[in-house]
Image (cartoon, grey):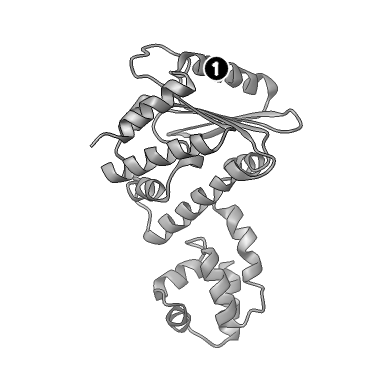
Amino acid sequence: MGELVKLFRGLADLTQRDLAERLLMSESLVGAYERAERIPTTAFLVEADAALGAKGVLASCVAMMEEEKYSPKFLNWKRTEAEAASISAYETMLVPGLLQTPAYVRALYEVRVPMYEPEEIDRHVEARLERRDVLDRRPRPIVSYVIEESVLHRPIGGTAVLKEQLAHVLESVRTRNHLTVQVMPTERAVHAGLSGPLKLLSTREGRNLGYAEGQGGATLFSRPEEANRLIDRFGALRAQALTPWESVALIERMAARP
């Protein structure tokens, strides 16, 4: 895509500075896009298309850019998630991605190590938030989450952001009968999730997939025996966690704290 931008900029007889001034951005960012050091945003491609008279060629690259937001493993997961019959996850550190608020998501990326550039943060926030549409598509997926109680205490982005996030979780549960959130109490010393977080998808064709992320990268579990092992583990987690009603009551108490 960067080469295409450079090509059309040359055909328009514009310098990088000229294009940057027209699009109200830095010359260095235009250069980074052209050298493929950064993935262009949707807005950049659409606006550059108009500014350079590309007649839709650059704008048509938006779909390609969307795929480049994700690693190949996660892209496969994302595509399956968009049409899954059921979505399940056990989270140990964060509120599940499909339930995260914009402020919570941005706070996560702003404290990442190594740090992201502001443009990269915007791109990742956009990608994370667009996935939330999965919750309300039709037919509705059955969504089940188990989260560690410590997640409710971790003030990512500050107390105000956390309170807004907890309120959003409560609203999501109350307004969607296909969504269940359960809390694993900290006092539960031993349970089935001590090996770490996990995610599960079931397709409408009956295929099951598992996904796990760690410091060393991500693993996609597609073989039936691997996915079934994670399904069994998640079933045990749900049995060991607080009930959905107990969990809502706990989240309400946490959200009401001063």
Q: Which amino acid does label 1 sit on?
A: Arg
Residue at 61% from the left image edge and 39% from the top image edge: 77
Give the class, few, some or many, for how many residues have Cα within 10 Å of label 1's Cα (few <14, many ≥20).
some
Q: Position of residue 73 (x, y in %)?
A: 59, 40
Q: What element carries label 1?
A: helix
| Visible residue check, residue 158 | no
> In the orientation shown, which residue stands out farthest toward the right?
205
Lateral position of residue 59 relative to residue 17, left or right = right
Q: Where is residue 162 in the image (x, y as percent from the top left)?
A: 33, 41
Residue nearest the viewer, comparing 163 with 237 = 163
Position of 129 relative to 43 (above/below) = above
Residue at 65% from the left image edge and 38% from the top image edge: 140
| Visible residue check, residue 176 | yes
Q: Position of residue 159 (x, y in %)?
A: 27, 42
> Which residue bears the numbered disc 1?
233
Q: How many numbered circles are shown?
A: 1
Position of 86 relative to 242 (above/below) = below
Q: Quadrant of residue 57?
A: bottom right
